[in-house]
Amino acid sequence: MSSKIYQKFLNRIRTSSPLVLCLTNSVTVTDCANSLLAIGASPVMSEDPSDAAALTSLAAALVINIGTINDRSQATMEAAAQVAVSKGLPVVLDPVGAGASPRRLEASRLFIDAATVIRGNASEILALAGQKGTQRGVDSSSKAEEEFLAEKAMRLAQDSHSLVAVSGKADLVTDGKKMIRIEGGTPLLTKLTGTGCMLSALIGAYVGGWPLEQLKAATAAHIHLARAGEKAQDRLERPLALGSFKVALFDELALVEGSDLDCPRGTGQWRLDA
């Protein structure tokens, strides 16, 4: 697949600065806001149902993250989701820890019908797909395990009529018919709390900025974070300097150019396969 198309999504974000309403968890709210600002989007957050509903009517996309779900935050998410559906706005669902507790799984399933994109790690996606005992994660390092995960992700996409994006050693993005596999990034992204939440926010900006090509837009968001992670790692003087890596990551999110999305770095970096 030619990747020459992907830079247009980033260019659109930086010229239109889409407003993304992030109803995210209390651990990563600042990181999500700063990651959106770094790529050129406009973040807004809310903790009140009536306020969130009003903001949704102004937004280009809604991101729902259930990482610290409670009754009030769920009510806020429900109010925003209702407006988003009525307006046909893209909704990104991040089902954090969906397999870890009945409360999280119930909350995640509540928003599936509203979701345009469901983004999670392997255990979260498998939990939503009805697989038992996945709350501690799935090692998708082997081809057979990855094929199993891809099959379940495609089925979930078909059943939910949404895109499904699975984060892992290789990221998978599917609309239920096509599957895109994205290699690259850096293991350091898994050493920081919130990089998955940041990715969900970035997807909101990309699909909100270009809602008519959501599969490609969501893929571009994955590549953006992967490329920023690679470049941030390259800047480190010490391999595991996580504080420095986090600062460099935000720098590189802002410095990524459209040409970075178009040009693979070579063997071992990201690759796209339809």
Image: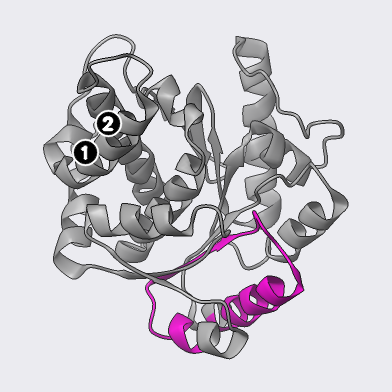
Q: Is residue 123 left or right of residue 197?
A: right
Residue at 65% in and 32% down: 122
Disc 1 target residue:
252
Which quarter of the rendered picture does the C terminus lie within? Answer: top left
- Front residue (pair 198, 244): 244
Q: In x, y percent, where is residue 6?
A: 24, 43
- Front residue (pair 32, 159): 32
Under mark 2, the amino acid is Arg
Q: In x, y percent, where is residue 23?
A: 54, 67
- Determine if the magenta segment contains residue 164: no
Up-down relation of residue 223 to residue 184 (above or below): below
Q: Is residue 12 visible?
A: yes
Q: In x, y percent, where is residue 202?
A: 38, 52
**How many numbered discs, if any?**
2
Up-down relation of residue 147 to residue 10 (above or below): above
Which quarter of the rendered picture does the N terminus lie within? Answer: top left
Label 2 secondary element = helix
Up-down relation of residue 5 to residue 41 (above or below): above
Under mark 1, the amino acid is Glu
Disc 2 target residue:
227
Residue at 31% in and 17% down: 269
Residue at 63% in and 39% down: 154
Q: Are marks 2 and 1 in contact (CB under 8 Å)?
A: yes
Stretch in magenta: 54-83
